[in-house]
Amino acid sequence: MTADAAARLESVLNAIRRAERQAGRPEGGVELIAVSKTFGAPDIEPVLAAGHRAFGENRVQEAQGKWPALRALHPGVELHLIGPLQSNKAADAVALFDVIHSVDRPKIARALAQEMETQRRRLKVFLQVNVGEEPQKAGVAPGDVDRFVIECRDELGLDVRGLMCIPPIDEPPSPYFALLEKLATRNGLTGLSMGMSADFAEAIAMGATHVRVGSAIFGEREKA
Ligand SMILES: *Cc1c(COP(=O)(O)O)cnc(C)c1O
């Protein structure tokens, strides 16, 4: 089972390169974040051994439990936080992660800015947009994005690289990817964190710069 992860990584990378070509985009321009949430070191090791270095986790505590040891063995790992963050975990998140994709409200933006100042670490961040305006989902509403970018980038001085979204699950994602692209361009942001196992090729067609792919690499997750 675990030996397959390297083969699946290879086929996801090939599919990404194919989508880049089809979209007329430069080869290698899209960054693959391998989402290793719920998987342990034995599952992650083969992907590291294959040379991959960008990984995504959705829980601070879970990531703290496995990544310090893996990092000590594999220099150059870049860790991305892709899940919701509570203010009381901001210090731990800033200490462990390199990139945060889930800055989803002013309160957490302020807590992160303060922690980065305290720890003298400047993480790259993406601002999460609730593109489908779903009540159960994190992120700022599309209509609040311009204001939130100003607050995060200009007032708090965060290193805002772009926008992130998770479209509604039971609808075609492309219109939502297009919306995120429009909101980013309008605000002078070039990063687009969008696309998961089921839809990363469509996301790349719509301009994704970072795709977050879990099950297509690691296999199905057990339901928590
Ligand atoms: C779990 C997760 C992913 C990866 O999902 P897959 O369908 O397994 O590729 C991507 N983004 C976020 C925010 C996630 O929580």
Image: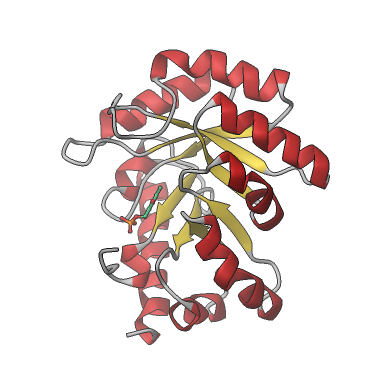
**Hey, which quadrant is residue 159 in on the image?**
top right
Q: Nearer the viewer, residue 88 or 99?
A: 88
Q: Position of residue 172 (x, y in %)?
A: 19, 36
Q: Position of residue 174 (x, y in %)?
A: 27, 33
Q: Nearer the viewer, residue 178 or 132?
A: 132
In the depicted structure, whether residue 88 falls above or below residue 182: below
Q: Nearer the viewer, residue 83 or 176?
A: 83
> How many labels were placed on the picture?
0
Q: Is residue 74 left or right of residue 103?
A: right
- Residue at 37% over, 61% down: 214
Q: Position of residue 54 (x, y in %)?
A: 56, 61
- Residue at 28% over, 48% down: 199
**Hey, which quadrant is residue 103 in on the image?**
top right
- Residue at 50% over, 57% down: 56
Q: Using the rendered image of the protein, determine whether residue 53 is visible from the camera's viewpoint.
A: no
Q: Is residue 215 left or right of residue 105?
A: left
Q: What is the residue that sits farthest to the left in this orientation? A: 170
In the depicted structure, whether residue 101 falls above or below residue 153: below
- Residue at 50% over, 42% down: 209
In the depicted structure, whether residue 147 falls above or below residue 209: above
Q: Using the rendered image of the protein, determine whether residue 124 is visible from the camera's viewpoint.
A: yes
Q: Position of residue 168 (x, y in %)?
A: 24, 36
In the depicted structure, whether residue 121 falls above or below residue 13: above
